[in-house]
Amino acid sequence: MTRTVLFPGLGLEFHLDRVAFQLFGLPIYWYGVIIACGFLLAVVFCYKMAPRFGVKQDDVIDLLFFAVPLAIIGARLYYIVFYLDLYRTEDGGLDFLEMLDIRDGGLAIYGGVIAAVIVLFFVCRYKKIPFLAFADLGGMGLLIGQCIGRWGNFVNVEAYGGPTDLPWRMGIDAYVDGVWQYMEVHPTFLYESLWNLLGFLLLLSVVLRGRRKFDGEIMWGYFLWYGFGRGLIEGLRTDSLYFFHTPIRVSQVLGFASALVAAGFLFYHLVLRRHKPEELYVNRMAAARKAAQEAKQQEEEDHGGERD
C-alpha cells in the first residue's frame, strides 16, 4: 500500500511504500531497514571512537552480542505492556506470534535503552571496565541510532503530532473520528530526528575538543538532552503510550524525569565539584600504559648494562 505525504508549505510530495523488498516471499519493511542502518552507523562510530574513552574496540563488539538482541526484546516488551490490547484475540487471549513480528514497527525506544543500560552494566562488571566511561560512548551511539531511526516512522506515516498550519506542516491521510480524511499535522518524527542530530553534534564537540571533565558526563548529557526534547515533542504527538488508561503520557514523564535527574548530576559535577584530568578513565589507562612502557624500557636498559 502506497501512501502520499505532503509538505505543502515546502512544496514537497512523497509517495511511500512501507515494503522495501521481498525476501523468500516475506515482505521486508523500510522501518526495519532504516533501524538497521541507524544501528550499523552507531556501531561504526562507537568502534572508531572507543579509544577516546579508554574502551577497547573489541569490547564494543563483545557488548553487541548481548546488547542488541536484549535491547530489541526490551523495546518490544515495553511497547507490548502499554499496548497489550493490540495483541488480544477475539476470545480474549494473546496472539504471541503477532507479538514477535517487529518488521513493521512496535518498538519503544525507552524499553531498548533500559535493556541496553542493564546489559552494559553487567558487561562492564565482568570486564572490569568503568560503567560510566563505556556509557559515555554508548550515549553518543544512541543519539545516532535515534536520529536515523525516526525516519522509519516517516515511511510508516506514524509518530506525527496534532493539527498545525506551520510552514513545515505535514499533510497526510488518516483516520479522524473513524473517518479517513486529509489532515495537516506536526511532523514530530522530524522534530525528534533533528533534535537528536543537534544533541549528537554538541556532545561530539565536547569530546573532540577535549572538554570532557568526568566519566559519565556524556551519558548524563544524553539523558538531559534527549529526555527534555522527548518530553516536549511527546506532548505534540497523537499516538503516545499512556499509563494504563490514564491521560499521563509514559514517554513524557520518563523524558522530563530523566532530564531532571541528569541536570542535577551535571550541576553537581560541573559546578560544585572539581575534577582533575587524571580522573578520566582514558587518561588513567594512558598513564598506566606509559608507566608500563617506561618500566619495560628501564628493564631493557638494566639488562643491557649487565651484558656490557
Image (cartoon, grey):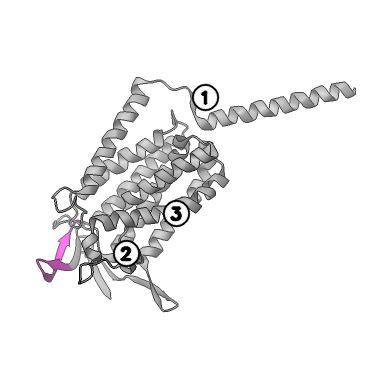
* Residue 40 image position (x, y, % from top left): 46, 56
Please give the count of numbered marks on the rendered protein.
3
Cα separation between marks 1 and 2: 48 Å
Amino acid on which disc 3 is placed: Val
Residue carrying label 3: 68
Residue 73 vs residue 289: left or right?
left
Amino acid on which disc 2 is placed: Met
Instruction: Name the N-terminal-most of marks 3 and 1.
Output: 3
Q: Secondary structure at mark 1?
A: helix
Viewer can see residue 140: no
Q: Secondary structure at mark 3?
A: helix
Quadrant of image for the N terminus: bottom left
Residue carrying label 2: 99
Is 306 above or below relative to 187?
above
Residue carrying label 1: 278
Quadrant of image for the C terminus: top right
Instruction: Name the N-terminal-most of marks 3 and 2.
Output: 3
- Please check the rendered image and state whether residue 115 is part of the magenta-colored stretch, yes or no: no
Which secondary structure class fits the magenta region best? Answer: strand
